[in-house]
Amino acid sequence: MKFSDGQTAEMMRAFAVAMLIALAIADADAGEAIAELGDVRVTYDDARWRTVERHGRIEFAPQGENAHRMDGAVLRVSDGDGDNACSDLALRAFEVGHYDTNGLAPTPVVVGGIPGQRFEAHTRCRNATPRGVAICVKHGAYAYLLQSLNSGCRGNNLFSGIDPLNEIAAQITFTPASR
């Protein structure tokens, strides 16, 4: 079958339009997803993370290749009463594993435009394991704790150069109504 130059050009235009539509649909379906917890909204890459929303928390599990290079994370909401709410939450969180919390000291961070605290603790394991990390922000009447902890002596992200908490925390916004 032979086509005239006009028919070939028309078919090429139709093909180009079809490709642009297909790319737009694929782009809209891939990438960005949203999880909400209390006053927090987290925008995340659903190709990198799978989330499970449960009462009072969102669990983030790395997907695909990332599952072998990153540890998961959990965002929890808790009562934010008291000046030491973040320190208390971090200490309780580190009780999950073999963490050495002697000398646990916060470093300042900002999450969603709100000042918070980052806590790190080394495991008491003999082998090389990633530090446990918890980031806490008080917002309104609540404290939000984003943590990446291991209950044992294994972990994925020690030498990967990836900080899953920073990646997730960078995408957190707070609703203005409770500020």
Image (cartoon, helix red, strand yellow):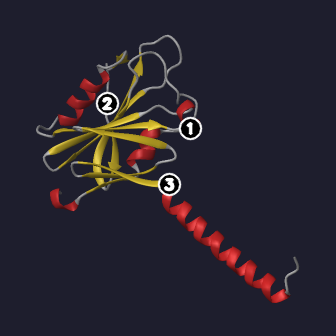
Q: Disc 2 residue type?
A: Ala
Q: Secondary structure at mark 1?
A: helix
Residue bearing the label numbered 1:
64
Residue 106 image point, x, y percent:
31, 35
N-terminal label among 3 and 1: 3
- Which mark is in front, 1 or 2? 1
Residue bearing the label numbered 2:
105
Q: Secondary structure at mark 2?
A: loop
N-terminal label among 2 and 3: 3
Q: Nearer the viewer, residue 85 or 151?
A: 151
- Which mark is in front, 2 or 3? 3
Q: Disc 1 residue type?
A: Gly
Q: Disc 3 residue type?
A: Gly
Q: Are marks 3 and 1 in contact (CB under 8 Å)?
A: no
Q: Are marks 1 and 2 in contact (CB under 8 Å)?
A: no
Residue bearing the label numbered 3:
31
